[in-house]
Image: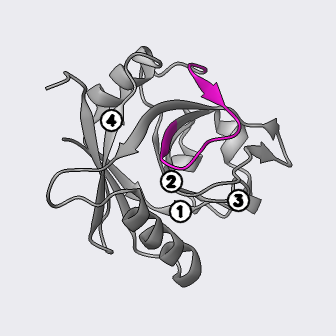
């Protein structure tokens, strides 16, 4: 046993899960904040701007740093945290319904999985949007998919819609 912490990330309606190894050595404060907050679940969304990203918004996670192990070019399998002030994410053009975490008065945390290549975290309203890389998808044990299977489900989310889909984050 290598001592690494893991979580399970699932698309509930599609019945697909993958295993994520936390990158405690690169993003210790982010990993600890997420770990303490688990389990988390929320509506699943597919990115408009970042390209190959599936994410959920939850109320701000206490203790999550604004920047730690940041990137604007996530690679396949990267799991990232984005910390947003209320004014950064509540724009009606983004399409989040009133009453969701996007409109929380304290801001929101975006927990994201990047499932394919060529991602660029640039938003026309605010510019560069660095995310904290705090985990990576690993081939899991029985009952979980690897990145390839999760990417198929994420791409299906893009093509066929995400209404009713939930993204679930749990300790492994």
Which residue corresponds to mark 3? Answer: 94
Residue 129 location in percent, x, y?
72, 36
Q: Which residue is mark 4?
A: 21
Does 2 sit left or right of 132 as displayed? left
Which quarter of the figure has residue 59?
top left
Residue range in magenta is 67-80
Quadrant of the frame with the C terminus: top left
Task: Establish if 48 lies above or below 15.
Answer: above
Question: Where, by quadrant of the figure, is residue 47 drawn?
Answer: bottom right
Q: Which residue, given by chain and number where applicable, does mark 2 sit on?
A: 55
Count of numbered labels shown in the rendering: 4
Tell me whether the residue at label 1 lies in contact with that at label 2, contact meaning CB atoms closer than 8 angstroms. yes
The residue located at (73%, 44%) in the rendering is 121
Q: Is residue 70 magenta?
A: yes
Q: Earlier in the sequence, mark 2 or mark 3?
A: 2
Packing grade of label 1 (10 A; few <14, some 14-19, many >=20) is many
Estimate the spatial distance between the alpha carbons at disc 1 and disc 2, rounded to whole Å.
5 Å
Determine the secondary structure under disc 2: strand
- Secondary structure state at the residue bearing disc 3: helix
Give residue 17's position: percent from left, percent from top. 28, 59
């Amino acid at each position: 046993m290598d001592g690494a912490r893991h979580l399970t990330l699932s698309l509930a309606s599609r019945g697909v899960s993958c295993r994520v190894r936390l990158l405690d050595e690169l993003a210790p404060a982010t990993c600890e904040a997420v770990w303490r907050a688990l389990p988390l679940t929320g509506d699943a969304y597919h990115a408009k701007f970042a390209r190959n990203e599936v994410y959920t918004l939850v109320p701000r996670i206490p203790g999550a740093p604004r920047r730690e192990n940041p990137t604007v070019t996530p690679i396949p399998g990267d799991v990232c945290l984005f910390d947003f002030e209320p004014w950064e994410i509540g724009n009606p053009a983004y399409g989040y319904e009133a009453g969701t975490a996007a409109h929380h008065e304290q801001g929101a945390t975006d927990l994201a999985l990047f499932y394919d290549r060529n991602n660029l975290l640039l938003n026309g309203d605010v510019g560069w949007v660095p995310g904290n890389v705090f985990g990576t998808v690993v081939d899991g044990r029985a009952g979980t998919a690897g990145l390839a299977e999760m990417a198929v489900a994420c791409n299906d989310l893009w093509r066929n819609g995400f209404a009713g889909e939930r993204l679930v984050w749990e300790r492994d």
